[in-house]
Image (cartoon, grey):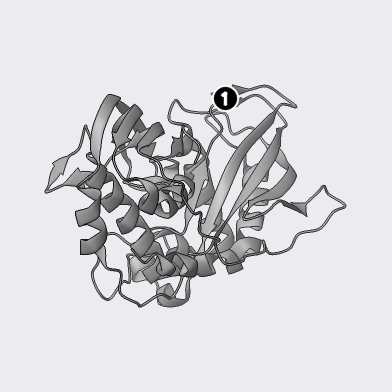
């Protein structure tokens, strides 16, 4: 199978370290607090018209906020799912309450040409720090920003440091060894559908479909890729790999959307699953999928998995 199209995919993963200036309360669904605050602050620093209804704005097609945070609003193809070019990712030990002077860390993953807007994102977090985060709107400062993928470098050190665009390079495809067992752990809820139904026990080909869909959308809308991906060949091969053990459970989360003015449920499967079969050829896909998140609501941090057995 030819996975050369993966070399057209590019993204960076940066780690933000925020120093809390007061006691910050995050919601149970941590992604809701961070992403919600980010969206509010991003619109505030980038909007030039200050209209409440973006679709009535004459500058909508030139708006950075719309392009990044609400890309489907002026999509001429009427595609329902244009992925936002960012993901908030949290360490497993992330807490819901942070005391004064504690450090809150998270990863901010940016895809494709959205990397060029990094100065906007930096200003967004600066403004959010001044506005306050969480239910009590406690302030924070940016202590440090490191780029941790595709390689480690310092972007921002301190108030006397510097800020520059994250660096990008072509993805190096991981070559797999002859392996017949794959163990995956879904750390944050994975929500995917197959044939119109929610999936509780994802067969390997469904898992691969989710990765391919995610990659293909990012390639098309954020990396300028207009080539063809031979889905059928990959999926048919994936059907030969079977589930050997499954320890997955469904989890529900609820968040309040200030933009939509309502409570919204998010859910998905978490836990471990083991596949057996000819895994080797799929390793490049699986490795990339572990970085970019898959399924629904990825920008909140959902759909994150890790590979338990190293190749």
Q: Toward which corner of the image does residue 167 lie, by quadrant?
A: bottom right
Is residue 292 placed above or below 136 in the rendered structure? below
Q: Position of residue 42 (x, y in %)?
A: 54, 56
Q: Is residue 186 left or right of residue 23?
A: left
Q: Position of residue 283 (x, y in %)?
A: 42, 49
Q: Toward which corner of the image does residue 48 lie, by quadrant?
A: bottom right
Q: Is residue 128 left or right of residue 47?
A: right
How many numbered badges does the structure rendering display? Answer: 1
Q: Position of residue 170 (x, y in %)?
A: 57, 67
* Front residue of this view, candidates 58 and 18: 18
Q: Pointer 1: what residue?
A: 93
Q: Secondary structure at mark 1?
A: loop
**Residue 293 in view of the camera:** yes
Are there few (<14), some (14-19), or many (20+) residues within 10 Å of tag 1?
few
**Residue 53 in view of the camera:** no
At 64% across and 45% down in the image, what residue appears?
A: 15
Q: Position of residue 287 (x, y in %)?
A: 46, 48
Q: Toward which corner of the image does residue 224 lie, by quadrant?
A: bottom left
């Amino acid at each position: 199978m030819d996975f050369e199209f993966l070399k057209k995919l590019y993204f960076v993963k940066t780690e933000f370290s925020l120093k809390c200036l007061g006691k910050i309360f995050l919601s149970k669904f941590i992604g809701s607090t961070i992403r919600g605050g980010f969206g509010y602050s991003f619109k505030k620093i980038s909007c030039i018209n200050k209209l409440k209804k973006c679709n009535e704005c004459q500058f909508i097609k030139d708006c950075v906020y719309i392009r990044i945070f609400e890309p489907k609003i002026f999509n001429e193809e009427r595609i329902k799912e244009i992925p936002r070019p960012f993901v908030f990712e949290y360490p497993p030990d992330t807490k819901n309450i942070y005391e004064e002077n504690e450090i809150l860390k998270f990863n901010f993953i940016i895809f494709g040409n959205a990397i060029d807007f990094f100065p906007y994102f930096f200003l967004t977090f600066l403004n959010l720090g001044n506005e306050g985060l969480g239910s009590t709107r406690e302030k924070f400062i940016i202590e440090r920003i490191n780029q941790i993928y595709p390689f480690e470098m310092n972007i921002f050190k301190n108030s006397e440091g510097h800020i520059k665009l994250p660096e990008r390079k072509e993805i190096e495809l991981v070559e797999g060894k002859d392996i017949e067992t794959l163990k995956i752990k879904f750390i944050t809820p994975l929500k995917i559908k197959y044939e119109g139904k929610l999936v509780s026990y994802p067969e390997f080909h469904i898992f691969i479909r989710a990765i391919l869909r995610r990659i293909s959308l990012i390639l098309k809308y954020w990396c300028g890729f207009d080539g063809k991906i031979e889905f059928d060949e990959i999926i048919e091969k994936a059907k030969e790999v079977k589930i050997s053990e499954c320890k997955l459970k469904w989890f529900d989360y609820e968040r309040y959307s200030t933009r939509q003015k309502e409570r919204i449920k998010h859910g998905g499967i978490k836990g471990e699953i083991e596949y057996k079969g000819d895994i080797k050829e799929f390793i490049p896909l699986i490795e990339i999928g572990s970085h970019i998140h898959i399924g629904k609501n990825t920008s909140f941090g959902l759909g994150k998995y890790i590979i338990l057995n190293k190749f």
